[in-house]
Amino acid sequence: MKAEIIAVGSELLTPHRLDTNSLFLTGELNRLGIEVQRKHVVGDNPDHLRDAFRGALERVNLVIAIGGLGPTADDLTRETVAELLGRALHRDEAILLWIEERFRRLGRAMPDINVRQAMVPEGATVLDNKRGTAPGLWLENDSRIVVLLPGPPAELEPMFTNTVVPKLEGLGGGVKLHSRQLRVAGLGESDVEQRVSSIYRSYSNTQTTILAGPGEVELHLRIWTDDATAAGRQLDEMVERFKLALDDHIFTTQGEALEEVVARELIAHGATICVAESATGGLVAQRLTRIAGSSTYFLGGVVCYSNTLKSAWVDVPAELIETRGAVSAEVTRALAEGIRRRSGATLGLAVTGIAGPGGATAEKPVGTVYLALANPKGVTERALRFPGDRERVRWQAAQAALDLVRRYFLYARRHGA
Amino acid sequence: MKAEIIAVGSELLTPHRLDTNSLFLTGELNRLGIEVQRKHVVGDNPDHLRDAFRGALERVNLVIAIGGLGPTADDLTRETVAELLGRALHRDEAILLWIEERFRRLGRAMPDINVRQAMVPEGATVLDNKRGTAPGLWLENDSRIVVLLPGPPAELEPMFTNTVVPKLEGLGGGVKLHSRQLRVAGLGESDVEQRVSSIYRSYSNTQTTILAGPGEVELHLRIWTDDATAAGRQLDEMVERFKLALDDHIFTTQGEALEEVVARELIAHGATICVAESATGGLVAQRLTRIAGSSTYFLGGVVCYSNTLKSAWVDVPAELIETRGAVSAEVTRALAEGIRRRSGATLGLAVTGIAGPGGATAEKPVGTVYLALANPKGVTERALRFPGDRERVRWQAAQAALDLVRRYFLYARRHGA
């Protein structure tokens, strides 16, 4: 079974908004064994909408449209699809009562325009919307399925999970998607490609995609098959071979973010961490606290932008800053040791750098980053240089800082510490 | 002139990747007076690619394809378009030399597969790629223009700006897009709608879109016209009327992020700021330092997650934390005053809250947030409650904290301080 997704809405054709619902839908469809073959974004224009639906219905047996089910004159999906499939629209009194009741509970009278949301094409199944006024619709036509969903993710997601998934289950046949997502830190895209290409090329039944993100590279392995056991065995085998080729650069084989891996390690070791950042300006702390329950391992952090605060808050000697520079291996080490001592955390992590565009010197160009991790036995340090603009340098610096913590635990484990 | 954008790549049909290049392209095209009418995402499949191009060429006079120009067997855009337009491909020796030279500078021999990137359809204009090996292509066919661009944004954006924009300029005719982007903090989407709907409904030539984001609402006003003076005058008039209706909730009429507005105010007043965060975990500091040159106004920040550090680092009395709770108006005020005193900044900003999912109590459910801003004359405080999950609560809390700073300067100005 193949699907196409049509996102409807003129705002999705401006420079300000993207269709993101299709990511959720694709994940759910793939789980059911349904491949998404094409995606479309169409404005609130009946001709374009009709054209997109007609094309999709010629190519695939499942067409999912998102949006355009609201009460205003712009919302054309319901009418356009009914007309295209030759279905008359009738008013569904149960939906109308339900919408009126919803407004009553909010203490308001239902505006007349909302009557449109109670119009249902002949033969359609109504999909309940627990979070809004626009019900979804399920239509079958010449062995094709058309599903119309509301645009707000808070309405679309529960509707899809509760009403569409049960109807689609089983329709996908035995062929399902089996996948793994590896994420790699400390290697560039072409280095990864070079190390793994001979491996993945030997598995012709597997789609392998290498994607470069800031400060990391992702490897997606995807097999469509009805033999779950064989797929699982082969993916495990591939992951083992990738591990040999990429060694300690792989930080997850389950698609987790780096901060989640670091959090897991800290918790497993009963360790706590405190950070002192300048160039990353709070990004490392923010990523470490993004995770629920982070207070078990994260004690706190200091963003010491001014040199005075580096000395006052983290005991970095003013002479050291003066002689070596605020962005230097020595000051970074002093920050890591100082923040560890001041907080009583197991680990003290420090980042300094030149994020740009200002502040660069001949020896320290934009992208220069120093990291230090003070631990109970000493300090690990790194001097790095990253390409890109301020935002990219900051993200890569935070990524490398978190990776330093991950590697600390990895080597401690390898060396039996 | 109307355009369609075709993003090519099977990874864009997975749950992990979105086409984001089309946002940049849409912004640039609109500036040139070219409307984007539809967007497509197609996998690395020649049939689907051909079908998408054929449809787009029937509907519009400018088709822009992104991606699929790489050297591997997956990269099919060049060949598919050449075949569809009936153009033979020939090897361009200048491009080949240039690619070989690029590899040589990186100290590597050019792999044989890269020869494909030197293949050019008959009659095509080659668009230089300063950042990668895949040149872009410009083709004209039966008064239609087809532009092929590489997928990586770092390659696509400069190529588009430097080579495509000059060729498109003037082609769009006199009709151009004129727009304003207002951003509003401290009001929900339906409140904004209620206050402004009668205003924008009276301008039938203007598309007005109200978009809700976390912690803010955006208002986009868009007029397509060849009369720039009239459009400018009308947009200014609309903005003035929106200002009356939305008052101090509008934080920008130029589309800036809230932290940019706050940064501008701090610089204009020669003021400095220091922050003490718990629930937002560094997000406020990170946003304030996202901006180039932030060291002129941002001295530093403290993320004090543990209660011990709240006392040790920001002098919050331990008894206060014990009697009132770490998340309380009193502790937040003490944090704001403490961080201001400890840093010597003009302003001390503090945020505490329950971001969830854990930590909630009957009186302080998930989403409870306290803010305090210590200034030279006293302290401003807020107690708020936000809906949503951990990420949304944190973002909204940071947004409200920054808005508190913005309003401080706004009222200071209004009261002649």
Image (tube, coloured by chain):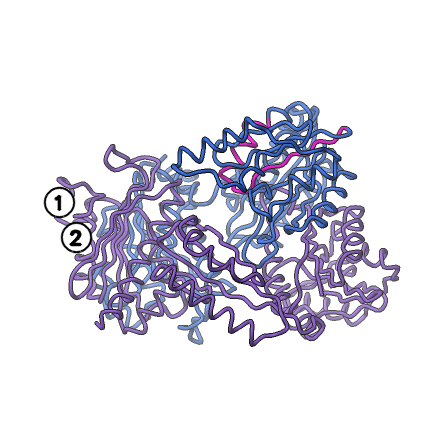
Chain colours: A blue, B purple
Q: Secondary structure at mark 2?
A: helix
Res B320 label: 1
Q: Nearer the viewer, residue B109 or B15?
A: B15
On screen, residue A142 above or below A316? above
Chain ID at mark 2: B
Give the CA distance from mark 1 to mark 2.
9 Å
Residue depicted at x 70% and y 73%: B173
Q: Is residue A159 magenta?
A: yes
Residue B288: x, y in percent? 35, 61
The kind of residue tagged 1 is Leu
On screen, residue A264 above or below B87? above
Q: Which residues are magenta?
A: A143-165
Res B132 label: none
Chain ID at mark 1: B
Residue A340: x, y in percent? 26, 51
| Image quarter of residue A289 | top left
